[in-house]
Amino acid sequence: MPTLLDVMRNFVEALMMEMQNPDTGIKTQTQRVLITNIPHAVAGNDIFQWILQRLQITEEEALHLGDLFVKYGYIYPLLDPKNLTLKTDGSLYRFQTPYFWPAQSWPADDTDYAIYLAKKNIKRKGILEEYEKEHYNMLNQKINYKWDFVIMQAKEQYKAGKERKKADRYALDCQERAYWLVNRTPPGMLDVLEYGLDRVTDPNEKKKKTIAVYRREIMYYQQAIMKTRVKSSVSLEGLVKYSEQFLSNDPILSGCLPSNPWITDDPDFWDLNAKLVEVPTRTRVERWAFNFNELIRDPKGRQNFQLFLRKEFSGENLSFWEACEDLKYGDQSKVKEKAEEIYKLFLAPGARRWINIDGTTMGITVKGLQHPHRYVLDAAQTHIYMLMKKDSYGRYLKSPVYKEMLAKAVVPQETVKKSSTFLFGRRQLRSSPSPIILRQQEEEAKAREAAATVDITQVMSKLDRRSQLKKEPPK
Amino acid sequence: LGCDGLQELQLLQLWNSRCSNHQLFAVHQVAERVEALGQFVMKTRRTLKGHGNKVLCMDWCKDKRRIVSSSQDGKVIVWDSFTTNKEHAVTMPCTWVMACAYAPSGCAIACGGLDNKCSVYPLTFDKNENMAAKKKSVAMHTNYLSACSFTNSDMQILTASGDGTCALWDVESGQLLQSFHGHGADVLCLDLAPSETGNTFVSGGCDKKAMVWDMRSGQCIQSFETHDSDINSVRYYPSGDAFASGSDDATCRLYDLRADREVAIYSKESIIFGASSVDFSLSGRLLFAGYNDYTINVWDVLKGSRVSILFGHENRVSTLRVSPDGTAFCSGSWDHTLRIWA
């Protein structure tokens, strides 16, 4: 994963050149360091202002971008070399020479670093910092076979340096130091060139395609041609409409009642919107009318819808749909068992909760059930889903069941964040029961319910059998 | 593949590219009549400190306040991000845990990385139980795990890997239910389609492609190649009719699935670092994107303009997810912290 794409690097490099343009670039100064005059220094504030003007961005952004230029080593601070930040005052910086610009093509070489450290060592014994000494010793072992070459190069460069003008020598020293601060980051400093893991496959490498790949591609294009595409003006209109419809429900854009828990530290919003809360909020109930999916995906909505369906004697539809979801997303090992149960309960002739689907779909489904798999009930599920969506849903929204829920629904009062006095730190934040505990409680409740409920049909069939026995003459 | 086969493929490709000759729109053209968003302010409301190294991934629990996060040093932590308390912690036997996910029940988590696997850990409060003891190894890839997600239940997991494939697994048995081949390089991200739009998911990879898959057949049903570099993140628009992507080419893009094309590019001259992670606000009007230059940019999805830029992290933003009820979003960073913004 590259740090900076070539395109971006070109852009930054172009900006660097623009900054140094004598007419349109940044005003330069000469900085006096000890007894040397260092030319072409620029003030941090001038860099900041230049970026601001050139890119027409906010001050925060301009500062951040300038800061990144320093962190990546395009610009380096003169007097505080290790502090790679952009200061918007008179602090002086210099432009790094293009030779030392960050480049993807040649990462900083171990040999070059060894030469640099050796050179530093020759210049003044004991000048190397702790981490540099560690690197030096490590490199000595790692590239020991080259060490004569390293020392020779270091001596040559040191000699050549001595023959330069003092100002030039100082400049080169600064440039080199800046380069190595970025490419061999000292401990405790941000390593900007760290990019994470290497890709496994180089996408630019031209791989020879196998027959399987070609087959897949042919199949893909064959079905792609068949696909009906919608006019972009139409489908985009759909996206716009969706955003508009849900705008009032978007807490980040429209707020939420009583308040956003993250802002006021008050979790009431979550309590009022609990999964199967006794009385839901008005916003929530109104949302069920947006589209069928919103209703069926909300457990409370589903509960209310089921109430309505029972009144219309089509409660088995929703139950069937729920059973299909359970089959699709459940444990693979239980697929056969579940499919059989669903068949017995919903699809078999005379089934207790027989669902009304057309002959063709029933035929496909029953055939598929001979070799059940996760998606075996897809056709039937889709049919029932569409039935509920296109038929029952409309009536539900006009029904007393829904209207009552809407009327009962609560509209919480808005709570404003109390002015926080941080005398005793943040208000005690309410913790919530872990989902683990909640699930335990739910399972216990279900078990109790199951024990208490009597299945009326089983009782009836028991009574039937008893009366049958009575009729038979005793043997 | 013979000469005829290659010719057939070329003809098909040509035909396919000619298929849509309608007038092409970008979303901002259609959204001209939509009211512009007012000024809005988002701040860091919580900072979660506790990881000792780069945070690589995070996911929300359905309870809207708990999260799971994973890091380069192998630590996976479950937090109640509202109180900032840590509730569970696991140390993986590998480093670079790039993927983690919270189970829909809230009672388990999944994670993986350089171990090439995806493992499921049931969460427990029993102090005597070592969480690692009940660990289930579910997915096995031949290279690093880059992303994972539970489907509609705790029983199935979808994974993406550096080996170039995605796969669907049964958690209980570890059985491979379906594999998805087609990417030409590492797959870096995936997202499941919202419920009504059926059994599909989208994946993004180092081959610059975003691919939409049919979970039943394993076939790729749509493919988009307009980015100039790796796609680090893909996320569906809440209606399921579109998805957004974030890439190393410093842009985010919106793809309309019904029109079968790219319909927006979210970019700025001053944004030169890759986008690592994207997610939509509840209504789909906003796109939050975390970048490798440590910032988070907030885009107006319909107008195509940048609404806000959020500073705070001190290193790359590596992961970003909006909470299940849309009240906030969480960002994780290489600076070892996670932040909740609202």
Image: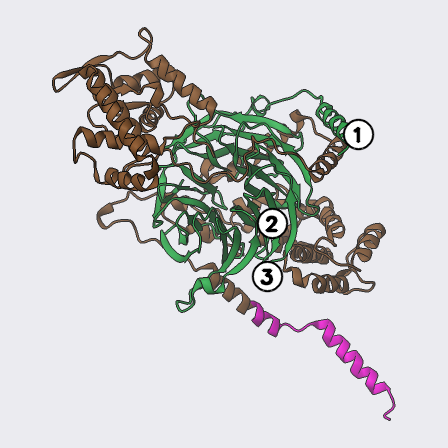
Amino acid identity at mark 2: Arg
Q: What amino acid is found at the position of numbered circle 3 in the picture?
A: Glu
From this viewpoint, which residue is outermost toward the left?
Answer: A35
Query: Which class describes the residues within 10 Å of circle 2: few (<14), some (14-19), or many (20+)?
Result: few
Horizontal and vertical percent position of residue B308: 41, 29
Front-most of residues A422 and A151: A151
Image quarter of residue A325: bottom right
Task: Say if A238 sits above or below A345 in the image.
Answer: above
The picture's colour for chain B is green
Among the 4 quarters of the image, the one containing residue A337: bottom right
Q: Measure how far apart labels 2 and 1 are at the Cα level.
A: 50 Å
Magenta stretch, main secondary structure class: helix
Q: Which residue is mark 2?
A: A297
Q: Quadrant of residue B19?
A: top right
> What residue sits right under mark 1 in the picture?
B4
Query: Which residue is rendered at x = 12% and y = 17% of the image?
Result: A35
- Front-most of residues B135 and B323: B135
Which stretch is magenta? A446-475
Instruction: Please tell me whether mark 3 or mark 1 is closer to you in this view.
Output: 1
User: Which residue is pictured at 62% across the width and 50% down the height?
Assistant: B168
The correct choice, above or below, for A307 with respect to A72 in the image is below
Specify whether residue A466 is painted magenta: yes
Chain at tag 3: B
Mark 2 against mark 1, which lies toward the viewer? Answer: 1
Image quarter of the N terminus of chain B: top right
Label 3 CA crowd tier, 10 Å (few <14, some 14–19, many 20+): some
Q: Circle 3 sits on which residue?
A: B172
* Residue A355, x across and y down, in percent: 77, 57
Q: Secondary structure at mark 3?
A: loop
Residue B250 drawn at (x, y percent):
47, 28
Residue shown at 66%/46% (left/top)? B215
